Amino acid sequence: DSTHEAGWEIRDFKRHNLYYDQCYSIESISGLTEQETAVKLVEPCEGECPSCRRQLVDFFQFDLTDLRFSFLPVPANSLHILQCVDCASYMGDERQAKLDSQGHGHWPNPSEQTEPISYGEGETVEWRIPSFTLVPRHPRHGVLETSELSHSQIGGIPTWIQGPNYPTCNCCGKTMMFVAQLDSEEVTDFEGIYYAFLCPDCQITATTYQCS
């Protein structure tokens, strides 16, 4: 879809952007003495994945009291985007989470219990989260072929590897809004990009993953 490639679609006979104009690059800086506190990456949280029984993580945690994130339409002081990073990486899991009044994500209980997926040794994702800072940039910067900055960003148009793939909200059927992306090579030994999305109307989040 060429319009999705450009970050928009036709909705109610009008152009509707699928991204937010506010954009910040997540820049790793060695020797940084003051760590960014308004956003956290890959933070362990309560609960286990119903598919593999491993601990879930908040892929992104946003402090919405920080004015830089005032564009995110969540009626809470924080936004937690829930995911099992192993299932997202190896199974293409696009499970969606419902936000509660505190901005924490919750997956629906599985309809039936199944045997947990077993990942072999070396198939789990090991994270190394560096010190980083947020740098304002143009919302289209991440899709420029000449871009030399990090692909990790908040807001703006996503940097697709395999082509545009905006999830559809399981509740209302609308295309979800892109929120942020994390370049896997900057934080793991694997290549690829993790993407985070939000349905503002239903307060539903989702994540996806693409690699070459």
Image: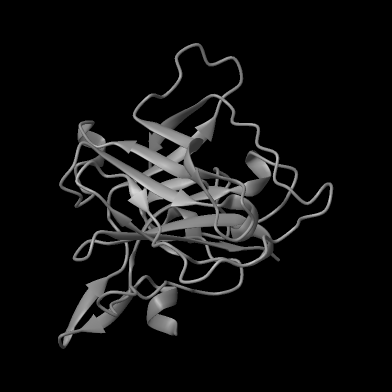
| Above or below 37: residue 62 | below
Q: Which residue is drawn at the image coordinates 28% and 53% (left, top)?
A: 99
Percent position (x, y) of residue 114?
62, 67
Q: Quadrant of residue 2?
A: bottom left
Left or right of 207 on screen, residue 127: right
| Above or below 33: residue 73 | below
Q: Which residue is drawn at the image coordinates 37% and 80% (left, top)?
A: 3
Percent position (x, y) of residue 158?
45, 60
- Quadrant containing the N terminus in the rendered view: bottom left
Left or right of 99 on screen, residue 154: right
| Above or below 63: residue 52 | below
Percent position (x, y) of residue 126?
70, 39
Name of the residue lying farthest toward the front: 113
Q: Nearer the viewer, residue 194 or 80?
A: 80
- Quadrant containing the C terminus in the rendered view: bottom right
Q: Nearer the viewer, residue 87 or 9?
A: 87
Q: Which residue is drawn at the image coordinates 67% and 63% (left, top)?
A: 211
